[in-house]
């Protein structure tokens, strides 16, 4: 990160990691853009992966201080289940005046201005406006993005139905689970760490959150099969799983159901892969 100490950078990243627990990137990403040659301020943006013309949308100016900026950004997106991250730079952010309304009672206004005072009007544009040429399609795309994240940021989390549901009952055996890895956390197993002849031997586990085709979330741990001489590093004999990797679980036992930040998880044990 720009012009901050390693300590501050790690502090910020740790805060974001905690804040992002239970959040995802399915609908996009909110991100803090670092100061650059155009501004000394940190700024808040939204990235829409479904957008063809304008995926990066400016939301607000934050602060010149990194910690203050992260605090303001977390407050701004508190109602969302979308992940908040940091970017050093982005590609072209010009809207080519595509966000200017050229008709109706808000003629001459920008979409982001109307989203603040009359969000239903922007939603109407997103849903009802008929686009015939490319400039109109760019305009409608921007309206759809503004409408989506305005509702996302201004609707309380308790009113958003989480996609994930609990699967099975406690102690039930599940079979033939086809999952996709969403998050991975590498963690030393403190109960197996040993010091042998002055050398520390670590057993590094992989804590996995994965989803099935219905977006139900599962949590389970893949234990280290061999020792590592470095904390937080897998042994050479253990497979390093990756986000997006497909898993086929032949059988597993439901250990518990729990919810974190209104997201439901099914914890598995005795996991056996095909």
Image: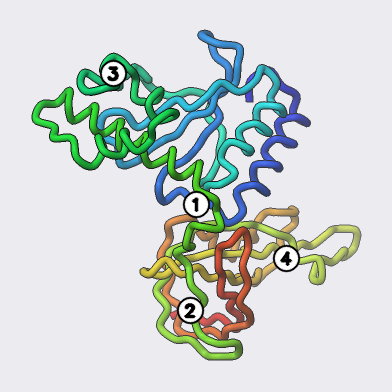
- Mark 3: few, some, or many residues within 10 Å (few <14, many ≥20)? some
Question: Rounded to the nearest whole Å, what is the CA distance between mark 4 and mark 3?
Answer: 58 Å
* Position of 240 relative to 266 (above/below): above
Residue 105 pos. (x, y %): 26, 22
Q: Nearer the viewer, mark 3 or mark 1?
A: 3
Residue 273: mark: 2
- Tell me if mark 4 has few (under 14), some (14-19) or many (20+) residues whose alpha carbon lies within 10 angstroms of its own: many
User: Quadrant of the rendered structure where residue 253 is?
Assistant: bottom right
Kindly identify which numbered label has been placed on residue 203. Answer: 4
Query: Which mark identifies residue 100?
Result: 3
Asked which secondary structure carries label 4, the reply is loop
Q: Is residue 246 left or right of residue 102?
A: right
Report x, y in % for residue 86.
56, 33
Numbered disc in front, either 4 or 3: 3
Question: From the viewer's perspective, is 176 left or right of 241?
Answer: left
Q: Quadrant of the C terminus?
A: bottom left
Q: Nearer the viewer, mark 2 or mark 1?
A: 1
In space, the residues marked 2 and 1 are separated at their CA atoms by 25 Å
Q: Earlier in the sequence, mark 2 or mark 1?
A: 1
Mark 2 to mark 3: distance in Å?
A: 54 Å
Q: Is residue 204 above or below residue 255?
A: above
As drawn, which residue projects farthest toward the right?
A: 198
Q: In this image, 163 relative to 88: left or right?
A: left
Q: Quick one: label 4 or label 1, which is nearer the N terminus? A: 1
Q: Which residue is mark 1?
A: 24
């Amino acid at each position: 990160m720009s012009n901050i100490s390693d300590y501050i950078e790690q502090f910020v990243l740790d805060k974001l990691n905690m804040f992002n627990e239970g959040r995802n990137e399915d609908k996009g990403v909110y991100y803090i853009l670092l100061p650059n040659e155009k501004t000394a301020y940190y700024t808040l943006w939204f990235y829409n992966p479904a957008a063809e013309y304008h995926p990066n949308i400016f939301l607000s100016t934050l602060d010149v201080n990194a910690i203050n900026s992260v605090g303001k950004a977390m407050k701004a997106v508190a109602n969302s289940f979308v992940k908040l991250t940091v970017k050093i730079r982005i590609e072209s952010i010009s809207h080519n005046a595509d966000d200017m309304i050229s008709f109706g009672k808000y003629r001459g206004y920008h979409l982001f201005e109307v989203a603040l005072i009359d969000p239903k009007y922007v939603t109407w544009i997103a849903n009802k406006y008929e686009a015939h040429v490319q400039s109109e399609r760019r305009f409608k795309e921007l309206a759809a993005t503004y409408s989506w994240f305005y509702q996302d940021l201004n609707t309380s989390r308790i009113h958003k139905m989480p996609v994930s549901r609990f699967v099975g009952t406690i102690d039930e055996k599940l079979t033939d689970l086809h999952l996709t890895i969403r998050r991975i956390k590498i963690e030393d197993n403190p109960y197996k760490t040993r010091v042998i002849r002055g050398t520390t031997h670590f057993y590094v586990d992989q804590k996995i959150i994965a989803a099935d085709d219905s977006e139900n979330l599962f949590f389970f741990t893949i234990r280290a099969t061999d020792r590592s001489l470095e904390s937080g590093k897998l042994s050479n004999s253990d497979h390093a799983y990756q986000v997006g990797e497909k898993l086929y679980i032949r059988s597993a036992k439901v250990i518990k159901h729990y919810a974190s930040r209104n997201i439901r998880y099914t914890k598995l044990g005795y996991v056996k892969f095909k």
